[in-house]
């Protein structure tokens, strides 16, 4: 929502907006051009645009010569495929790819990446190919350019070590969010016998819900700290009621395409036995014998977190008074063309910093990579974030009882003979879910979307269908790398 307002503003000043997405979303409605693409193939489209930039000699040759390493490797990769091949797989017309190359050559072009393209097995390479496109077109380090993925500089503004005390950790064990269930079930020396869940709802938010439920049910003791009786809380042995954001003072920031921090004043007292999260942890620390480490007031904690910003004029008093503050970030990242790589240059490949060569990899669940699976499950499932709720937090507050809405492309509706509000079953080898059809007029052919976050009590969770595998770089999920089938169903 922060970015959308800015897009509306710059459009009034003449900036052209291009939206590339499998679904004709709200942003697409204000775009100058909408390009429909097969889910998970954005990186391959970027490769096609680079091929056309080079064919038409529209690349930023000076930047490539002076400020990059490994461009020859990239050229070899691009030469290994034809534009026709890229057009076939992305399902984007070749002339559209050529047109986008001309757009990228008309600098500056700001490439704003959504938070979905990385959620495939080839997700890491997708982002690398998009970064490469921005570099080849000369849109790095210039005002109005950039490869913008949220705003990761924001978190660097605050102090964390004083709050998290990493020096106290003598031994740790961790696993990614995607692999929570497998981590719990397979852990040995020691086994995991107790879980404390805070600021989350794994039973709707973590992939492969059936496996997640098995994992959390296997624990001897499960504690959930939350404001509501979520699906995970319903499974818990103990539920500790947490205070909401309106019941404690705090400083809020996010990486959602802006670099501002907001002051959240305490407006009311927490009801009943609800307590702030920090109070709960401090009381637990007291009972474990190291309560002194947590013996700080709320005000002292806030001042700790802001300590590194005081010399930049950002104090607790000032943010309390002004309600929000602009954080110190580089307005134009990489303007000096000095990169955080071993060579100090932008690296297309061939170093530890870039994890080897870029690849033209595809999602795992497609007819090209897994034809047998695609024969059983021919449709691509997306599980995007709903506009109406922050993940699973607000569905139970709706005036009308929520239900599973199965949004499908018009081509799929014709193929399957489905109409709006038809009751359907959606399934794959991991599980199944039932819901009501809503036909999308401009979705990419063969695309299905079911919003994430819907509680089991309302027919969810869609994560019964999603995979818990990690993406190619081990940092992301494969939530969108998901094939399903769909058919009419009888209500029970």
Image: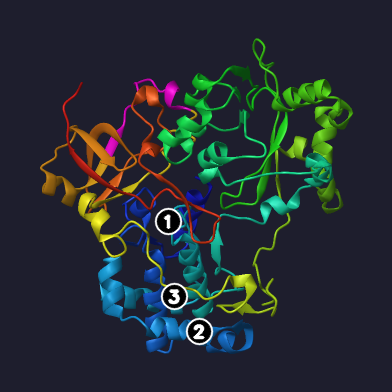
Instruction: Please give the name of the residue rendered at 42% of the width and 56% of the height, measured from the top-left corner.
Output: 120
Judging from the image, what secondary structure is the residue with disc 1 in? loop
Choose top left, top right, bottom left or bottom right for residue 316. Answer: top right
> Which is nearer the eye, 178 or 124?
178
- Mark 1: few, some, or many residues within 10 Å (few <14, many ≥20)? many
Residue denoted by label 3? 104
Whole-angstrom CA distance, mark 3 to mark 2, is 21 Å
| Location of residue 137 with respect to 227 vertically, above or below | below
Q: Is residue 433 visible?
A: yes
Which residue is outermost to the right?
292
Q: What residue is disc 1 on? A: 120
Q: Nearer the viewer, mark 3 or mark 1?
A: 1
Label 3 residue SS: helix
Q: Is residue 387 above or below residue 247?
A: below
- Per the model, the C-alpha gap separating discs 3 and 1 is 25 Å
How far across and down, in percent of the image, does residue 106 sit? 45, 78
């Amino acid at each position: 929502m922060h970015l959308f307002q800015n897009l509306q503003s710059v459009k009034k000043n003449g900036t052209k907006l291009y939206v590339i997405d499998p679904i004709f979303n709200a942003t697409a409605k204000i775009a100058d051009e909408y390009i429909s693409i097969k889910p998970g193939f954005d990186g391959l489209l970027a490769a096609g645009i680079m091929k056309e930039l080079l064919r038409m000699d529209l690349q930023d040759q000076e930047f490539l010569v002076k400020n990059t390493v490994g461009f020859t490797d990239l050229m070899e990769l691009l030469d290994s495929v034809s534009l026709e091949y890229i057009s076939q797989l992305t399902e984007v017309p070749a002339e559209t790819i050529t047109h986008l190359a001309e757009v990228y050559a008309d600098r500056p072009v700001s490439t704003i990446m959504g938070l979905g393209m990385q959620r495939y097995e080839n997700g890491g390479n997708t982002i690398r190919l998009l970064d490469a496109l921005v570099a080849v077109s000369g849109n790095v380090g210039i005002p109005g350019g950039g490869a913008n993925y949220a705003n990761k500089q924001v978190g660097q503004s605050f102090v964390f070590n004083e709050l998290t005390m990493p020096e106290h950790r003598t031994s740790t064990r961790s696993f990614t969010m995607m692999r929570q269930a497998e981590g719990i079930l397979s852990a040995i020396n020691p086994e995991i016998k107790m879980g404390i869940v805070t600021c989350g709802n794994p039973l709707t938010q973590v992939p492969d819900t059936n496996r997640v439920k098995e994992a959390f049910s296997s624990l001897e003791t499960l504690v959930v700290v939350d404001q509501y009786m979520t699906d995970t809380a319903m499974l818990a042995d103990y539920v500790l009621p947490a205070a909401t954001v309106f019941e404690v003072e705090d400083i809020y920031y996010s990486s959602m395409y802006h670099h501002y921090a907001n002051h959240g004043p305490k407006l009311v007292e927490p009801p009943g036995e609800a307590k702030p999260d920090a109070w709960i942890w401090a009381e637990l620390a007291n009972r474990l014998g190291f309560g002194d480490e947590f013996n700080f007031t709320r005000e002292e904690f806030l001042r700790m977190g802001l300590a590194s910003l005081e010399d930049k004029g950002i104090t607790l008093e000032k943010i309390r008074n002004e309600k929000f503050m602009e954080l110190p970030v580089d307005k134009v990242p990489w303007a000096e063309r000095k990169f955080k790589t071993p060579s100090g240059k932008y690296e297309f490949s061939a170093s530890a910093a870039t994890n080897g060569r870029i690849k033209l990899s595809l999602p795992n669940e497609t007819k090209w990579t897994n034809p047998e699976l695609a024969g059983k499950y021919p449709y691509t499932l997306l599980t995007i974030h709903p506009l109406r709720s922050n993940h699973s937090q607000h569905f139970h507050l709706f005036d009308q009882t929520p239900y599973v809405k199965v949004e499908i492309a018009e081509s799929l509706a014709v193929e399957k003979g489905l109409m709006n509000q038809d009751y359907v079953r959606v399934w794959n080898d991991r599980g199944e879910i039932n819901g009501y059809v809503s036909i999308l007029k401009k979705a990419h052919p063969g695309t299905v979307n079911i919003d994430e976050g819907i509680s089991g009590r309302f027919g969810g969770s869609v994560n019964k269908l999603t995979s818990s595998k990690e993406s190619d770089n081990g940092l992301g999920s494969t939530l969108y790398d998901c094939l399903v089938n769909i058919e009419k169903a009888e209500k029970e």
